[in-house]
Structure formats: structure tokens, C-alpha cells
Amino acid sequence: MAEPLTAGITRDRAFELLNEHNKDPFHITHGETVEGTMRYFAREFDPENEEFWGIVGLLHDLDWEEHEDDPMNHTIYAAKILKDEGASPELIRAIQTHTSDFNTSLPKPELQMEKILFACDELTGLIGAAVIMRPSKSVMDFTTKSLKKKFKDKRFAAGCSRDVISQGAEMLGWELPELFDRTIAAMQSFAPDHDTFQA
């Protein structure tokens, strides 16, 4: 049996770091949204490593706000921050895989966790953008049918890459509707903890 994965950093410290390097509440909320989504999938696929999956999700965009003008090196800056904090190589690698589409020198997603992060980062953003346009402002009444419409409308939330979402689904061996269903369910699982979801 494989040893549980270690992040080398506590969830509390990870959240402190996220706040130290991001001042816009939008980015904090996005980190928490991806954390909750990753935890949901961990409970299905890798329950003993739920904490690790969650910290990966929380910190995946740690350096984005400070370096968004340099997307090629997104997560390169984060790697140094995390190494200095004593984070594990496994945590750093997992975070860096989600930007391998920008920087091909970075490791590509191989583990289920890494593939899910790759697919769901952009998708949670698209869902969040769609949800805040709804009268309810809630993901609880959001459907895959509605998401399909938003996905096809390339002008809506144009910053959310449909290509990356499609690549992520392909990596996982899932059809897009399955990825949509699962990610909406993931976000619904912790919706009471959030008033809205951010892209």
C-alpha cells in the first residue's frame, strides 16, 4: 500500500500564504473553490490523501496575482515560495502540472489528482461566472444543460479556456458532460460555505 502523500505544509499555513501573496478577495475565493472541488474528488478517488488534494487546490494559483503579467512562469515563482516554506516536492510538482499548457518545460499531469486539477481549474471559473449571472446566485440550481450553453458561447467568460477544459476531460477519459456533471456536483457539495463562486 502506498504511503500517504505529504504536503510538507499545513492547511492553515497554506491559507496564510495565499493571503500573503494575494490581496484581491477574488483570488482567495478561487483558491478555496478549487480546494473544495479537489477535496470532493479526493473523497471518491483517493480518500486517504484528501488533505493533500485540498492544499494543492488551495495553492494552485499562489503566485498568479503577483505575476499575472508573466504567465509562462506561473507556478515557477510559487515553487520557490513553497520550497522556502518546506513544502514537499510532490506538492510543488502537482501545482506546476496545471500550467504545463503554458510552459512545456513543466511536468505534465500524470496522477489522477493532477489531471483533475488541470480540468477543473478553468471549469470552476466558467461555472462561477455563470452562477453569478443567475437570479439565485447559487450553484445549487445550476445544471449541466446551462453549462453546455455557456461553454459553447466563446464570448462568455472568454478568459476560461475551453481548450484546456476539453484537454482535461480527455486526460481523464471522461466525456465533457461527465466532467460537467461531476464538477457541478463537487461545487454543490460545499456551496453552503460560499455565497458566490469566483472565476
Image (cartoon, rainbow, N blue to C red):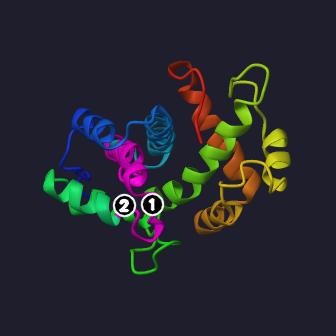
Looking at the rendering, the stretch of residues picked out in magenta corresponds to 49-75
Residue indicated by mark 2: 94
| Whether label 2 touches label 1, CB < 8 Å | yes
The mark nearer the N terminus, 2 or 1, is: 2
Q: Position of residue 155 (x, y in %)?
A: 80, 53
x and y, in percent, of residue 106 in the image: 39, 75
Q: Is residue 90 left or right of residue 186?
A: left
Residue ID for mark 1 = 114
Viewer-side residue, 46 vs 147: 147
Q: Main secondary structure of the magenta part?
A: helix
The residue type indicated by label 1 comes to Glu
Q: Nearer the viewer, residue 140 or 18?
A: 18
- Would you say residue 73 sits in the magenta stretch? yes
x, y percentage for residue 61? 42, 51
Q: Residue at x 44, y 70 (%)?
A: 110
Considering depth in this image, is 19 or 177 the residue closer to the camera? 19
**From the viewer's perspective, is residue 82 above or below residue 142?**
below
As drawn, which residue projects farthest toward the front?
69
Q: Secondary structure at mark 2?
A: helix
Residue at x-position 61% and y-position 45% = 125
Number of numbered markers: 2
Verify whether residue 17 appears in magenta: no
User: Which numbered tag is attached to residue 104?
Assistant: none
